[in-house]
Image (tube, rainbow, N blue to C red):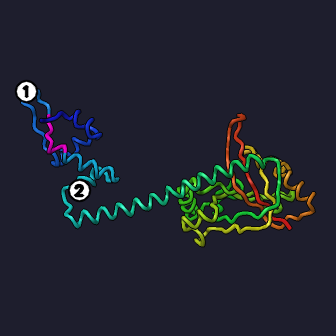
Amino acid sequence: MKYKIGEVAKLLGVSIEAIRFFEKRGLINPTRDEVSGYRMYSAAELNVLMRIRGYTKCGFTLAETASLIEACDLDGMASRLGERAEKLESEILYQQALLKCLWMRQEHLHRVTEMVGRSVIERSPTFYGIIYRFGQLIPEDEDLREQVREWVERKPFAETLLIFPKGYLEGRKESYLHGLCMEECLARFFDVVGKPGVVEFPSRRAVYSIDIIPYEHTLEKRQTIQFFSAARRYINEQGLRIVGDSYGRTIHSTKASGEYVHYSEQWIPVE
């Protein structure tokens, strides 16, 4: 019994293009029906394609799969499977970290919803991050820009970092700082702790607050007092004193109201 290419593709769950690829590599050799002109595939070809299907399901590309059959002896095959297993293990660890990150983000957003317009005193989490913007200016430093590219590749683990200098919070005209950051557990997973240019934001006693910040091109035109005013009012009411720069992250951006706004959380260090 022999089968047309469409039947083989449907039976094995492989594309016609993949079957033709392996045919061109000489790994399968269908015969041509003298009457219809169709290429016909025997059970032997199906067995080879099943083996091929198994390798591609392991994550090997079509070309890699072809090379496994063409050139690998038993030791070579064992080595290639080991290499694939190591790569898969790394991918699994990444996916597990991503899963943890998503659950953390969901839980965090629930808390943020409850905290809009409120302030509390708490210990800030430890963050690690890079600073690459001073107001609207990105320095023409290629090393810094390369570092930014590396951190952008770590999205969504890396989040937008926003720093308000102490003077800014006290009403003076000072530029805010912009960057990317990760909580400590994620920073250690990506092995960025202690790397050049990576800044540690240690845990500290702080006032935690959420503010809704408008689209950035309007930010510097507005009065400082408009931002985190509820937090500053809370600080005054509690008889506290700001003792350092405030840092935090933008946790959501939305255009639901017609113009972009950013939900920013900040930890303002106090005594």
- The C terminus sits in image quarter: bottom right
Please say if 262 is above or below 78.
above
Can you give x and y, in whole percent of width and height, for residue 48 in the image?
Answer: 19, 48
Q: Name the element at disc 2.
A: helix
Disc 1 or 2, which lies upstream in sequence?
1
The residue sitting at the top extreme is 35
Q: Residue at x 28, y 66 (%)?
A: 79
Which residue is at the front of the view, 197 or 111?
111
Numbered mark located on residue 67 in the image: 2
Q: Which residues are magenta?
A: 39-46
Residue beneath disc 1? 35
Tally of numbered discs:
2
Can you give x and y, in whole percent of width and height, for residue 180 in the image?
Answer: 63, 58
Which residue is at the front of the view, 63 or 3?
3
Q: Name the element at disc 1.
A: loop
- The N terminus sits in image quarter: top left
